[in-house]
Image (cartoon, grey):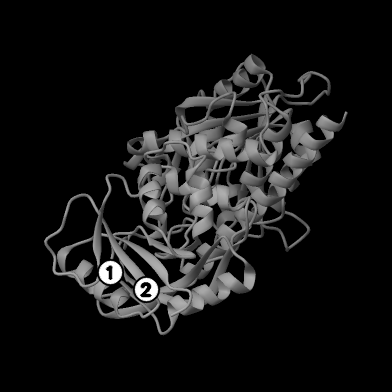
């Protein structure tokens, strides 16, 4: 049969592996079938050979796969989970690969959980889809020539080999999604979205993070998107402001937490003047009334004339308010500052490093402010020389965030309620130095009313599409910037 393929499938538990192997063995289009395993198996397998590997996502694993791959296309499934291809799924992947001349093809899938099947649509790959946790589903079909070309230049990674491969592949061809549910797999991570979002900064993943950063940096250098550690100078005293710093709290319907947030600001001890601007986005749950009970001249409550503002739009209301100080400092309406010295530490950092933005570290807690895992989020993967490049790979920059007001007024926030802080952070890193505070100065509540606590797949995909789009725009701006500098 034409267009036969080699399949490489990760070993899982005894029963599921046998079932998976049998499912793929039935496909006439499969030429050779290999089980990726750490040791030779005693399982009864039909039409399947063992391929001994140590780290599934390593460069070495890819080299072993490439040595065995002898067909035009190679199917790779690195998740150790039960898999079942749908009707003519493999033929469909080959058909799309040939139609588009793709370097790699992936497809939507379904998840089997306690006998029920749930659709799991994926999102299209963009130029800026640089995050290493991009979901390609359980199965990818590669043009074998891409694997062989990559193997000749690949860096030896333990964790980032597969990530480096797909970055390399984008320079050779398209990565194409098929919006059809071609495979099914068992549920492997039943956690809620709010419990998964901090996996990428877990201290247990530090070795992996270092490799991922290196692979991303190599890719940026390859495509002209890498930024050297050269920053625009700043004169922090060029413009005059009535106060040194303003805390800005956008709020909508946070009557349960707004008192805590405001009080944590008003108790700050500083050697400079500061105020608090709360942008009340037409709350209707008692938040507005709660704010009226505060009797402090430092507090201004602003209600926008517009009714179409997201969090980013509310931030713009704050930074362009006539009372905004030289530094605009973030506080979410359900969070608090760790102690009375937070503002002082942030402003000191601006002057110590002459930076346009300062980002702190925070402690995760439950609603009652009891610490919860993973604990302190400090983004210690950031380095002064390469943080601005690595920022394109990770999913966030940290908190609290503070801005030199003249710079943030020039950039402005996108009027959205997700990713607005990431968008302006990337834009600032393109030109300016960012200061970091690695001690926790902020307490971040994780509770049922967080915007990302219980996201369904459609909403999560929407968020990821937006952040990938932000990365795409930023990457294009950086490539253009480098080209202009080179042409000078």
Q: Nearer the viewer, mark 1 or mark 2?
A: 2
Q: Residue at x 47, y 59 (%)?
A: 135
* Nearer to the camera, 149 or 158: 149
Residue at (72% x, 50% y) in the render = 473
Q: Quadrant of the N terminus?
A: bottom left
- Which disc is residue 30 wearing? 2
| Image quadrant where one finds the C terminus | top right
Q: CA distance from mark 1 to mark 2?
A: 18 Å
On residue 82, which mark appears? 1
- Circles 1 and 2, Cβ within 8 Å, touching? The answer is no
Instruction: Give the image location of residue 36, x and y in percent.
Output: 28, 56
In the image, residue 235 above or below residue 334: above
Q: Is residue 317 visible?
A: yes
Q: Which mark is residue 42?
A: none
Query: Where is residue 83 drawn, in percent x and y?
Result: 31, 71
Q: Is residue 391 visible?
A: no
> In x, y percent, where is residue 427?
71, 40
Counting other residues with Cα less than 10 Å from the Cα at mark 2, is it few (<14), some (14-19), or many (20 or more)?
Answer: many
Q: Residue at x 63, y 48 (%)?
A: 250
Q: From the viewer's perspective, is residue 341 above or below residue 294?
A: above
Q: Nearer the viewer, residue 21 or 317?
A: 21
| Position in image of residue 40 (x %, y %) | 16, 54
Q: Secondary structure at mark 1?
A: loop
Image position of 154 with respect to 245: above or below: below
């Amino acid at each position: 049969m034409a267009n036969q393929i080699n399949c490489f499938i990760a070993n899982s538990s005894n029963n599921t592996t046998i079932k998976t192997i049998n499912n793929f063995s039935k496909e006439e289009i499969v030429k050779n079938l290999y089980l990726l395993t750490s040791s030779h198996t005693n399982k009864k397998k039909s039409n399947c050979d063992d391929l001994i590997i140590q780290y599934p996502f390593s460069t070495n694993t890819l080299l072993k796969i490439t040595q065995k791959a002898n067909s035009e296309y190679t199917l790779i499934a690195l998740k150790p989970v039960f898999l079942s291809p749908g009707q003519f799924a493999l033929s469909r992947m080959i058909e799309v690969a040939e139609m588009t001349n793709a370097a790699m093809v992936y497809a939507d899938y379904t998840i089997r959980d306690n006998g029920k099947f749930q659709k799991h649509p994926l999102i299209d790959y963009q130029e800026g889809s640089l995050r290493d946790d991009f979901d390609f589903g359980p199965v990818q079909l590669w043009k074998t020539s891409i694997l062989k070309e990559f193997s000749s230049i690949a860096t030896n990674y333990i964790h980032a080999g597969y990530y480096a491969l797909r970055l390399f592949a984008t320079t050779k061809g398209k990565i194409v999604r098929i919006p059809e549910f071609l495979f099914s797999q068992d549920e492997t991570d039943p956690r809620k979205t709010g419990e998964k979002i901090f996996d990428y900064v877990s201290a247990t993943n530090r070795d992996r993070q270092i490799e991922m950063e290196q692979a991303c940096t190599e890719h940026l250098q390859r495509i002209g998107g890498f930024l050297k550690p050269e920053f625009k100078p700043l004169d922090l005293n060029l413009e005059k402001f009535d106060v040194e710093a303003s805390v800005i709290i956008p709020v909508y319907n946070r009557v349960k937490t707004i008192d805590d947030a405001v009080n944590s600001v008003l108790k700050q001890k500083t050697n400079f003047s500061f105020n608090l601007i709360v942008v009340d986005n037409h709350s209707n749950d008692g938040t507005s009334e709660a704010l009226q009970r505060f009797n402090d001249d430092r507090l201004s409550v602003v209600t926008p004339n517009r009714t179409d503002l997201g969090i980013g739009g509310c931030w713009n209301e704050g930074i362009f308010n006539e009372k905004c100080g030289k530094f605009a400092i973030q506080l979410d309406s359900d969070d608090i500052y760790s102690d009375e010295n937070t503002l002082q530490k942030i402003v000191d950092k601006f002057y110590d490093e002459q930076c346009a933005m300062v980002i702190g570290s925070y402690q995760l807690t439950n609603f009652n402010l009891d610490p919860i895992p993973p604990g302190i989020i400090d983004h210690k993967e950031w380095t002064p020389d390469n943080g601005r490049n690595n920022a394109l790979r990770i999913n966030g920059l940290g908190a609290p965030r503070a801005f030199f007001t003249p710079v943030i007024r020039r950039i402005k926030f996108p009027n959205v309620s997700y990713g607005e802080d990431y968008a302006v952070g990337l834009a600032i890193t393109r030109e300016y130095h960012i200061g970091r505070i690695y001690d926790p100065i902020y307490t971040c509540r994780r509770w049922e009313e967080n915007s990302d606590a219980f996201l369904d797949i459609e909403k999560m995909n929407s968020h990821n599409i937006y952040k990938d789009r932000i990365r795409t725009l930023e990457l294009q701006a950086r490539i253009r910037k480098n080209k202009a500098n080179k042409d000078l």
